[in-house]
Amino acid sequence: MTIATGVTWAIAGLSTAGVIIRPMRWPEWVWAIAGAALIVAFGLLPPASAIAAICKGRDVYLFLIGMMLLSETAREHGVFDWVAAIAVNLANGSGARLFLLVYTTGVLVTTLLSNDATAVVLTPAVFAVARRARAEPLPLLLACALVANAASFVLPISNPANLVLYGGHMPPLGQWLGSFALPSLASIVATFVILRLMERKLIVGECARDVERPVLAGGGKLALAGILLTALLLVVMSSLDLQLGLPTAIAGIATALIVSLLAGRSPVALARRVSWGVLLLVAGMFVLVEALDGTGVIAMVAAAMRAVALDPVPGAAAAGATLAVASNLMNNLPAGLVASLAVAEAAPTRIVTDALLIGVDLGPNLSVTGSLATILWLQAIRREGEDVGFWRFFRVGAVAMPVALLAAIAARLLNA
């Protein structure tokens, strides 16, 4: 190993640790950007290569911009409070029914809008639900975080990491469902059962019922329409195998502008309340992965993939489990990027690639910073005055993730 390789790995490791641990409570993006800046400052990656790496994430940036603007518009115009009242009344005083309702809604939102949308859009609504129902919020919030990953391979659009891993060329929708319909069902059901059992003391019992539903004004109706139309747009774009970032950004910007202007409010003030730091986090991660690529780590991963291809079924299981764990050590965004580059180089069998996708999508349920969606979820609940520490999340994830991962990969291997 050369000195440059050792320094690159050290910076990438410390930067990732900073994102996970958040020393001095500094935001996650500070550590990612600091690592990227050190990589360039020490001459480990030319500035032009760093800029090129940042540009690789443009579709992810655009997607997040659209989703965050949709969420903030919905929040400002009362959509979340309106949804909360409906959910509480449907639960009819049952905490267990309310939990099931939230989890099912999370499956639908993740499937049709992506796991990031569940973190950004659904989580504030669920917090409003808990407040209106006078229910313990933590199990409901954990349901949002876990289902965001557990249901993230139902459709290609359910997780932006899906597009990354397949190099921008998704399998046809029919082929996708043939591979992932049963594993997704296994993942969703297993995660629900584990979370329901582990949090049962906080879920059972009565909650409020028959709360007054607020009137959804014109701005709220337009914001809700913007979210629903965006979901439809994403399904159409996915079926045409087109990128999702630009349409999502256009939908979010248009919704925010139209609703704000018609309501006589400033769209600039709305935009200031968005957590833009997440874009810097993603940009920093892309630079770190580009630097790691230069050290030969991608070639090593590709060689390992070619080795498992000699015995694809157990090899696929091992590859998926390994990437699931790695996604928590370095976050699933850089882990998925590394895997995607290795897949492009090694060209493994379809069963191995599918197992890798399950691992990178579902693995982050082990730890609170395992995925971009969970980091977005953390930011959303912190805005509401809540927080979930590493060990509180890990206590649930250490059971839920391995069980769901085993169930999902086993279901995929049944079709091998």
Image: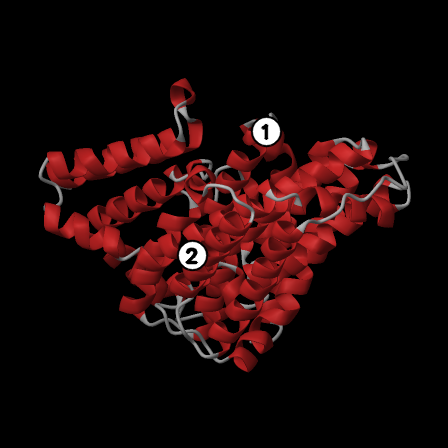
CA distance for labels 2 and 1: 26 Å
Secondary element under disc 2, as helix, strand or loop, is helix
Q: Could you tell me which residue is drawn at 78 percent across and 35 percent down? A: 132
Q: Could you tell me which residue is drawn at 43 percent across and 41 percent down? A: 271
Q: Which residue is mark 1?
A: 388
Mark 1: amino acid? Val
Residue 28, above or below 240:
above
User: Would you say 12 lies left or right of 352 here?
Assistant: left
Residues under numbered marks 2 and 1 in contact, where contact means CB atoms less than 8 Å apart: no
Q: Which residue is mark 2?
A: 63
Residue 27 screen position, x and y as percent = 40, 29
Residue 280 screen position, x and y as percent = 32, 41
Quarter of the image with the C terminus in it:
bottom right
User: Would you say 246 lies left or right of 55 here?
Assistant: right
The image quarter in which residue 140 lies: top right
Residue 16 screen position, x and y as percent = 35, 36
Residue 246 screen position, x and y as percent = 38, 63
The residue lying toward the viewer, choosing from 81 and 276, is 81
Mark 2: amino acid? Phe
The residue lying toward the viewer, choosing from 239 and 247, is 247
Q: Bin the neighbour count of mark 2 within 10 Å (Cα to Cα): few under 14, some 14-19, many 20 and up.
A: many
